[in-house]
Amino acid sequence: MAAMLLTAAVLATTACTDREAQRQAQAAAEAQAKERAAAQLQREYDAAVAANNWELARIHGAALLAQYPDPPAAEAVEPALADVTARADAAREQRRLAALWNYARVAAGKGEQRSAAILSTEAVDTGGTAPATVQLVIRDHPEWKRSAYLVLQGGDFDCYGGCKVKLTFDDAAAKPASAWRPKTDEAIAMFIEDYRGLWKQMRKSQRIAIEFPVKGGAGKAGGTRTAVFEVGGLDGAQMPGWD
């Protein structure tokens, strides 16, 4: 009986020892797997940073800190993540600004017309049936050459024979500029004479506000209106020779 009890005790102890060994082995394997996964995620993070892909780097960095906060890999990422996040936000904003522009290339005369156009950030009451966005167009025509002008969807500019508009770039003081409305019904357009200066300042700015006069009539008051354009995403390469 004593021998049987001793054998049972030995077997129980062995079983307990085996379970503990298995538990430790499993814990070690899980720790190694965790370290490998964290290291892989850091490699992806580092690769995104090296490629200046800040949005992807932010995703990998945030995942690393959230899923593996303890390994050294996470500790290496955390100090730089704030800067990466700021760069990612800036990249997303620049992509949004770039998407506001519409570029076109069409055959015209003996060559090709190029244009870059953008709509105002908000609708403007210019005397039409309802407030509508105003369009700013930069154009390079083989015969009419270069120009910059505004286009309305309704109402009209009070600028036949010439007028003054006010241009405000970012937070700078407003500056007057000469403009004129051609006598044509093909489009409700008003040209800004100093298109070179407009382009030059616009290429250095994020926003431009243009105040222009509108015609009254049919019970609607004239006066001036202001259209605001977020121009910071303009791709100068789309208009060769302008920069």
Image: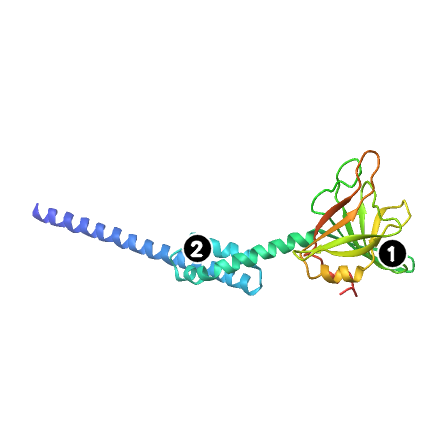
**Horizontal and vertical percent for residue 238?**
76, 60
Is residue 204 or residue 83 the one in the foreground? 204
Q: Quadrant of the N terminus?
A: top left
Residue ID for mark 2 = 65
Which residue appears at 20% of the width and 52% of the height? Answer: 14
Classify mark 1: residues with Cα within 10 Å, few (<14), some (14-19) or many (20+). Answer: few
Name the image quarter holding residue 173. bottom right
Q: Earlier in the sequence, mark 1 or mark 2?
A: 2
Residue 79's spot in the image, x, y percent?
45, 61
Residue 175 % position (x, y): 74, 57
Say left or right for 160 vs 82.
Answer: right
Q: Secondary structure at mark 1?
A: strand
Tell me the distance, in whole angstroms, between the alpha carbons under discs 1 and 2: 54 Å
Q: Residue at x 27, y 55 (%)?
A: 21
> Circle 1 is placed at which residue position?
107
Q: Tell me the kind of residue under disc 2.
A: Leu
- Residue drawn at 78 percent across, 41 percent down: 126
Which one is in front, 111 or 172? 172
Height in image: 222 above or below 111?
A: above
Residue 7 at x, y percent in the picture: 14, 50
Q: Residue furthest left?
A: 2
The amino acid sitting under disc 1 is Ala
